[in-house]
Amino acid sequence: MRPHFKPAIGAFLTGLLGVGLYFVFGREQQVLSVLSFGYGALQDAMIVSPAAEGSLYLALVLFAVAVGKILTTGLTIGSGGSGGVFGPSMVIGGCGGGALGIVMHWLWPALVPHPACFVIVGMAGFFAAAAKTPFSTLVIVSELTGNYNLLLPTLWVCALTFLLSDEQSIYSSQVESRSRSPAHQGDYVREVLTGLKVQQFLTNQPVPVLHLGDSLETVIERLENTPYTILPVTNEEGFLLGVVSLEQVYMAIRLPDRLRPIVLATDLMRTDVIPLRAGDPLDHALELLVENNLLELPVVDESPQQRVIGIVKRADVSSTYLRHVHGMRNRTEQTKET
């Protein structure tokens, strides 16, 4: 089946279902809510008198609307058609709750004096289970209905439906936790790297550096003999002047042969690079690496002249982050086992 035929087939089946319910219920226009917003059915369920004649028939209609809305929403969304899930969830839960409230009132009038309450509680409970958001659903439904008089029973229903439902959410893009959310990923990285500093990557090994007058051949030779893709350029006292990256060297190699001997480190270096300091936290180091668009950054001391004392790789920071995440997961698993 061609993909562009699916929405048309879904729309056809949805219309067929709505028309079928319309004739099954004797041309009852209320059941056509399965093809529209359905908020009118919710309004009728909240204002109808439970003792009125025909209220049981209304309960049957509301139940049919709830079931029909499940089918029509599934056909629309599943076939790739345009439609939301919040509104239908409100209608399904509210109509189902309203039908149950009317039936319960007829069976036990003293126990259920106001079946309309079941509409509000049903709306909140159904969406809390479908979206896996019990507390926000509680606030949303209370705001939609205009009062918080049913806050406590709605809270109980939302909690129960959330616990009794499975782990799958109606929103397919909803992630399991904040740590996997792109919007909160930066916050999670900061929490994991809290307390870790750049100084833990500093060693007593001499730092490979360049000077302003070093030739292109010298720059290439120094890069070949180091595990880094950047080299800091310093003066005679070791103060930072800039950095030369592998990208600049690659561009210089492509110059004509007659121009290569006159290319010096001062021609290749970048002077806009913000260096790291030994006391910088690792989350700040990651931000500077991204901001400078480099795989490594020089580390300088606290003096205003910025003496070079080391080089930090982005790969080292990332591996440290992964080790801490792995350690946190192991500790969590051990806690659960005990």
Image (spheres, rainbow, N blue to C red):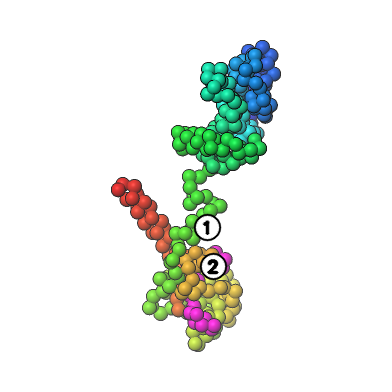
Residue 276 visible in the shown view: yes
Nearer the observer: mark 1 or 2; the answer is 1
Q: CA distance from mark 1 to mark 2?
A: 14 Å
Q: Position of residue 332 (x, y in %)?
A: 36, 51
User: Which amino acid, mark 2?
Assistant: Leu
Residue 249 visible in the shown view: no
289 over 161 or under it: above or below? below
Residue 212 belongs to the span the image colors magenta? no
Residue at 56% across / 73% down in the picture? Answer: 274
Residue 261 position by quadrant: bottom right
Q: Position of residue 304 (x, y in %)?
A: 54, 83
Q: Position of residue 29 (x, y in %)?
A: 69, 18
Dot placed on the residue nearer the N-terminal end, 1 or 2: 1
**Local crowd at mark 2 within 10 Å, few (<14), some, or many (≥20)?**
some
Q: Describe residue 325's horizontal placement relative to residue 89 as left or right.
A: left
Do the CB atoms of the residues marked 1 and 2 lie less than 8 Å apart? no
Residue at 59% across / 78% down in the picture? Answer: 267
Q: Which residue is denoted by mark 1 in the rendering?
A: 186
Q: Describe residue 246's horizontal placement relative to residue 322 as left or right.
A: right
146 over 8 or under it: above or below? below
Residue at 51% across / 82% down in the picture? Answer: 303
Residue at 58% across / 24% down in the picture? Answer: 113
The magenta span reads: 290-307
Q: Secondary structure at mark 1?
A: helix
Q: Which residue is denoted by mark 2 in the rendering?
A: 288
